[in-house]
Amino acid sequence: MLNTIDLAVLGLAAYRATQLGVHDTILDPARQRLAAWHNKKIDSRPRGFLMQLIGCIYCLGWWASGAVLTVWWFWRDNQVVQFGLLWFAVAGAQALLNRRDDTFGG
């Protein structure tokens, strides 16, 4: 079972992964290529599903959380994995604090 610290770290890492996939401009080119691919066959259900997935913070968040948890579950003793998850967790905390500042001033 997860302890509170592990849960917080994994939650922050999943939050950051979700923000990266849905909002961050660094992935705009990839999202634009996927949109162009989708537009070539607009009635394709798999393509529509993928576009809905990357446009929905709750949908992608579900899968990002599962991916983060899976990585932690199977490779938690790997120092590279630990470092990567902690990096995402710290970035997630930073992003949340920035959102707080943007909302309330800071």
Image: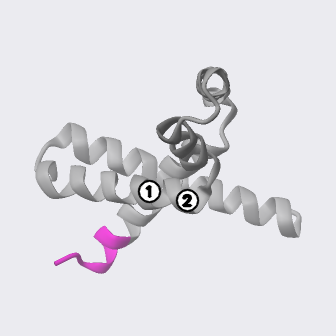
**Type of the residue with mark 1:** Ala
Q: Residues within 10 Å of mark 1 (few under 14, many from 20)?
A: many
Residue 22 percent across, percent down from the top left: 62, 45
Residue 11 on the magenta span: no
Which residue range is magenta in the image? 1-7
Residue 43 percent across, percent down from the top left: 61, 36
Q: Are marks 2 and 1 in contact (CB under 8 Å)?
A: no
Residue 68 percent across, percent down from the top left: 32, 53
Vertical placement of 51 versus 28: above or below?
A: below
Q: Which residue is mark 1?
A: 14
Q: Is residue 86 left or right of residue 46?
A: left
- The quarter of the picture where residue 89 lies is bottom left
Residue 17 percent across, percent down from the top left: 48, 48
Picture residue at 80% right of the left edge, 62% below the top: 101
Residue 6 on the magenta span: yes
What distance separates the C-alpha of mark 2 from that of mark 1? 11 Å
Earlier in the chain: of badge 2 and badge 1, it is 1
In the rendered view of the protein, which quadrant contains the C terminus? bottom right
Choose between 1 and 58: the one closer to the eye: 58
Picture residue at 74% right of the left edge, 60% below the top: 99
Q: Which residue is mark 2?
A: 93
**Type of the residue with mark 2:** Ala
Picture residue at 60% right of the left edge, 29% below the top: 27
- In what element is the residue under mark 1? helix
- The quarter of the picture where residue 37 lies is top right
